[in-house]
Image (cartoon, rainbow, N blue to C red):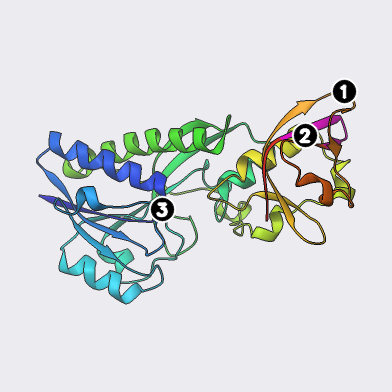
Amino acid sequence: MKKIAFVIYRKWAYEIFKNIMAFQKENCNFTVSLLILTPNAEFKTEEFKDFTNIFIVEGNDHAKITFILAENEIDVVCYYSWSWLIKEPILSKYVCLCLHPSPLPKYRGGSPIQNQIINGELDSAVSVFRMGKGLDDGDIYKQLPMSLSGTIDDIFARMINLGTIITQQFILDFIGNKVIFTPQLFLEKNLPLKRRTPQQSEIFLKKVLSLSYIELYNMVRSLLDPYPNVFISFPNARLFIQEIIPYKDIPLDGIVLNETSLQTINQKNFPLYLHLSDGYAFITKYKII
């Protein structure tokens, strides 16, 4: 029987794990025998404590993860939503899979969803590949197209669905010794991107007028929780923007934000607007910290 481990910490990856746990009930030739998560994981695991081995490990504790994988005699490791590089001997000893939400080799590296949406991409892909020594440079098992429309939660839902489909097919192919990996081409032309920092989510009022509505909308929707929200800094606080809608007319019922308007935006239910290059954005959801 083939043994599979999930090493994860994001909620969307946990949803794929749950789907594969359900899938193993239909197939007796494999078992999800191990779940490794970090202390700051975005989910709770009580529902599976009696059905698989669960360990909480710091993401950079390579030695401990190596030991746990060896003790559980794992065949395949699904490093889905993992933010740390995997080292030897893990890479050579196991089939290590990663799921990346981009049409690799494009947008490999950090913050792939955000980088694609902010760059105006409409379509993407879910890529599952065998991890190599570099960053998202391994041979691809399967890549399925994915739309980038809607909210970040809409995109996560598609990732979960497509990730589940690909993982299920991989397991069947692995059991049947039918797995084929295809090397990525033109890696040198698609260098890995750095993970976005929280400070990159800041927008400046003096530059807002040069943004179109769709540019600001793409920033806001791609940077919703759990990612650092778009924010504007004022002398004593920050305004975090979580939802906007277009507004073409000159607002007469609220505040068009400027550098001195923070003292009035704390008033409850007071409409807030941003003046853009092609109209206005009505800020329908925000928080002040």
Residue 243 found in image quarter: top right
Q: Position of residue 4 (x, y in %)?
A: 21, 52
Q: Residue at x 34, y 42 (%)?
A: 15
Q: Residue 81, position in %: x, y?
A: 42, 53
The residue indicated by pointer 3 is: 42
> Is residue 286 highlighted in magenta?
no
* 281 in the magenta segment: yes
Q: Nearer the viewer, residue 82 or 198?
A: 198
Say which label, 2 or 1, has the lower sequence index: 1
Q: Nearer the viewer, residue 261 or 242?
A: 261
Asked if the residue under mark 1 is in contact with the one under mark 2, i.e. CB atoms within 8 Å, the reply is no
Residue 269, percent across and down?
A: 72, 35
**Residue type beneath disc 3:** Glu
**Nearest-to-viewer mark from 3 and 2:** 2
Q: Residues within 10 Å of mark 1 (few under 14, many from 20)?
A: few
**Towards the viewer: 109 or 263:** 263
In the rendered structure, find residue 271 and report the number of the disc placed on it.
2
Q: Amino acid at mark 2?
A: Pro
Secondary element at tag 2: loop
Q: Which residues are magenta?
A: 274-283
Mark 2 vs mark 1: in front: 2
As drawn, the label of residue 249 is: 1
Residue 178 seen from this side: no
The disc label shown at residue 71, or none = none
- Tag 3 secondary structure: loop
Count neighbours of disc 3 (C-alpha within 10 A) and say few if under 14, some if 14 to 19, many if 20 or more.
some
Q: Amino acid at mark 1?
A: Asp
Q: Is residue 98 above or below residue 245?
A: below
* Residue drawn at x 38%, y 33% as measured from the top left: 161
In screen coordinates, is 225 left or right of 21?
right
Total marks drawn? 3
Q: CA distance from mark 3 to mark 2?
A: 33 Å
